[in-house]
C-alpha cells in the first residue's frame, strides 16, 4: 500500500525558514517524480514544486522560485521542501504527491497524496 | 502559463441527478488533464486522468471527456458521498489546477 507522510509544518515568523519532509512507502520511490502542492485556508490547490525521480530535475512555481528548494533522498525514501524567506501568503496546508506515470520528468496526474502538513506564517 | 477555468463555481444538485462540470484551458493541453475530488480536511483524490481514464477503484458513475481546451466531468447519478469540491489539473506544461467546483446539496 502506497503511503506518504508529511512532517515539519508549524508556526514560523515572516522571513523565517522551515523544512518539510515527506516519507514514502509502498512503491519504488526513486522511480517516480514527486511534487509539493499547497492549499491556503479556504482556497484552491496550487502546485508548488516538482522533482524528477533521480533528483536531477527540479521545477518551481513562480510564486516560490528563489525561496523554496525541493530535494529528495532516495536512500531514505524521503522528499523535502526547504522554505526560506517565508511570507504570510505561504500559509497553507502542504501536500506531497506522487505522480502516476513513472516515465514523466516532473508532473502527471497525482495518484497518491499525503495527509498534508499545515504551515502558518505569522508574527 | 496555462490558465484553467472551471465552471460553475458552485453547483446545487440532488441525489440521483446527472451532474456535469466544465474545465477550460487557456491553450491546448491535448488530453493531459486530471480530475480530483476533495472533501473538507482531506487530501484530494484522483478520479480521472488523461481526460477520460478512470482511476482504479473510482466508481463508474464518474466519467471524463474532452481534449484540446474543453473538458467535462460527469457524475451520472449523484450519490450522497459525492458532495465535495472537484478540481481539474493540467499537466501539459508543469501543473496548474482550476479554482474548483463545489457540489452542494440542493
Image (cartoon, coloured by chain):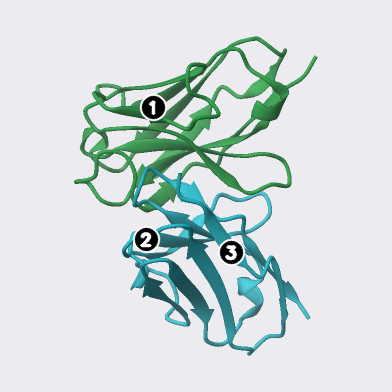
Give the chain of mark 3: B
Residue B6 shows which numbered tag? 3
| Residue B38 x, y percent position in the rendering | 59, 58
Q: Nearer the viewer, residue B89 or A29?
A: B89
- SS type, badge 3: strand
Q: Residue under circle 2?
A: B28
| Residue B67 x, y percent position in the rendering | 36, 70
| Residue A38 x, y percent position in the rendering | 57, 38
Q: Residue under circle 1?
A: A79
Give the chain of mark 1: A
Position of the C terminus of chain B by quadrant? bottom right
Q: Residue at 21%, 38% (x, y): give it.
A: A31
Q: Residue at 27%, 42% (x, y): give it.
A: A27
Is residue B26 rendered to the left or right of residue A91? Answer: left
Q: How many C-alpha atoms fall within 10 Å of the one at disc 1: few (<14), some, or many (≥20)?
A: many
Q: Which chain is cyan?
A: B
| Residue A46 x, y percent position in the rendering | 55, 42
Tag nearer the camera, 3 or 2: 2
Amino acid at each position: 500500500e502506497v503511503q506518504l507522510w508529511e512532517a515539519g509544518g508549524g508556526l514560523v515568523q515572516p522571513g523565517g525558514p522551515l523544512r518539510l519532509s515527506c516519507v514514502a512507502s509502498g512503491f519504488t520511490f526513486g522511480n517516480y517524480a514527486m511534487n509539493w502542492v499547497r492549499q491556503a485556508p479556504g482556497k484552491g490547490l496550487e502546485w508548488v514544486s516538482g522533482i524528477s525521480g533521480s533528483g536531477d530535475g527540479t521545477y518551481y512555481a513562480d510564486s516560490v522560485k528563489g525561496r523554496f528548494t525541493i530535494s529528495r533522498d532516495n536512500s531514505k525514501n524521503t522528499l523535502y521542501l526547504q522554505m526560506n524567506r517565508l511570507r504570510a501568503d505561504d500559509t497553507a496546508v502542504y501536500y506531497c504527491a506522487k505522480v502516476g506515470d513513472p516515465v514523466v520528468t516532473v508532473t502527471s496526474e497525482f495518484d497518491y497524496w499525503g495527509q498534508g502538513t499545515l504551515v502558518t506564517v505569522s508574527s | 502559463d496555462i490558465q484553467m477555468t472551471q465552471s460553475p463555481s458552485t453547483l446545487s444538485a440532488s441525489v440521483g441527478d446527472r451532474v456535469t462540470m466544465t474545465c477550460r484551458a487557456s491553450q491546448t493541453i491535448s488530453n493531459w488533464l486530471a480530475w480530483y475530488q476533495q472533501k473538507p480536511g482531506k487530501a484530494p483524490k484522483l478520479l480521472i486522468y488523461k481526460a477520460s481514464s478512470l482511476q482504479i477503484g473510482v466508481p463508474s458513475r464518474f466519467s471524463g471527456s474532452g481534449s484540446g481546451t474543453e473538458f467535462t466531468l460527469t457524475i451520472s447519478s449523484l450519490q450522497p458521498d459525492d458532495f465535495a469540491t472537484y478540481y481539474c489539473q493540467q499537466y501539459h506544461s508543469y501543473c496548474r489546477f482550476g479554482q474548483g467546483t463545489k457540489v452542494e446539496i440542493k
